[in-house]
Amino acid sequence: MEAMQKNGKLGAAEVGRIGYGAMQLAGPHVFGPPEDRDAAVAVLRRAVELGVRHLDTSDYYGPYVVNEIIAEALRPYPDDLVLVTKVGARRDADGGWPEALEADDLRLAVRENLDRLGVDSIDVVNLRMPGLTGPVERSLAEPFGVLAELREQGLIKELGVSNVTAAQLTEARSIAPVVCVQNLFNVVDHSDDALVDETAELGIAYVPFFPLGGFTPIQAEALNRVAARHGATDRQVALAWLLHRSPNILLIPGTSSIAHLESNLAAGDIELTEEDLADLTL
């Protein structure tokens, strides 16, 4: 097998293929503050120290808490750090995630991300479309058009979409350039196989959420068998599989632990063999 690429493209930026997702820095159920704010700050600083340059967040993580911690930990930001956020939902008093796709909702969300992150322009903003069990086929023209206008105003540098179908990606690209797709995909759930290949052909980054999947005992056995060959963990193998699946895949595993952060990044050093890949045809 060819050596796996260590870097990938996220719009105009070159980033390591394993970034960091900040969602787990909030409290339980991504609501409220973390139990240990100092530990959250330390994880972010260690990530950047280890070379992470793709940081995924949202102002509705907490809400607000995670972006405030990011600003505390990392400002002034490294010049090559790519900050990616998402809009399209809000948090209610019970911790729910109601959609927020009206023009005023989106403009406010972008402004709040800018203010709490402490930047004049956000590197990438993803439009997160509704759907609890997968994408819902509906037009995204109006909300994506709002973000395209904010991009023209210089408040956003580049745009992405999340929880979308192939048709919605095509619709978005007819309005403005799309640099990334954030969808459900992992070693168990291959429902987005065709879209992974399509985005690779288009030069668009594909960023899986829920990258570690929900493994059955049989699937976990296969992961553990491969992991044993490499002196790795099953989670590292699941991440390595995604990196081997397509060169446009960029990962954003999240954690509130420095040890787990370092373990996630080490998954990039695992070179899976043909035997491994056959075992991982789950």
Image: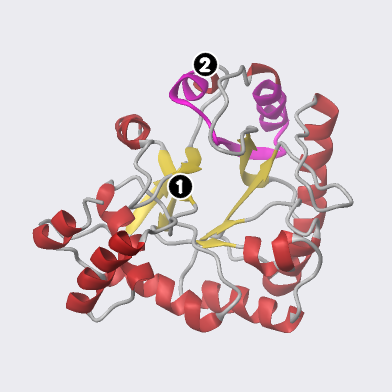
In the picture provided, is 145 more to the left or to the right than 181? right
Q: Determine which quarter of the picture holds residue 131.
A: top right
Residue 272 percent across, percent down from the top left:
18, 63
Inspect the image, locate mark 2, and give the three-letter code of the amino acid beneath it.
Ser
On screen, residue 178 versus residue 16, left or right, reads right
Identify which residue is drawn at 78% across, 38% down. Answer: 98
Q: Position of residue 17 (x, y in %)?
A: 38, 58
Q: Quadrant of residue 274?
A: bottom left
Mark 1 is on which residue type? Val
Foreground of the two, 35 or 80: 35
Provide the residue span drawn in magenta: 143-170
Chain-order first, disc 1 or disc 2: 2
Identify the residue shown where x is 55% and y is 65%.
254
**Residue at (75%, 73%) from the top-left corner?**
34
Mark 1 and 2 residues: CB-CB less than 8 Å, in contact? Answer: no
Q: Quadrant of the N terminus?
A: bottom left
> Label 2: few (<14), some or many (≥20) within 10 Å?
few
The nearer-to-camera label among 1 and 2 is: 1
Residue identified by numbered label 1? 207
In the visual, does 261 lie left or right of 216? right
Name the residue tied to disc 2. Answer: 174
- Seen in the picture, residue 31 relative to 124 is either above or below; the reply is below
Q: CA distance from mark 1 to mark 2?
A: 21 Å
**At x 64% / y 81%, what residue is drawn?**
42
**Whether residue 101 is situated above or below residue 38 in the rendered picture:** above
| Magenta stretch: includes residue 166 | yes
| Magenta span includes 144 | yes
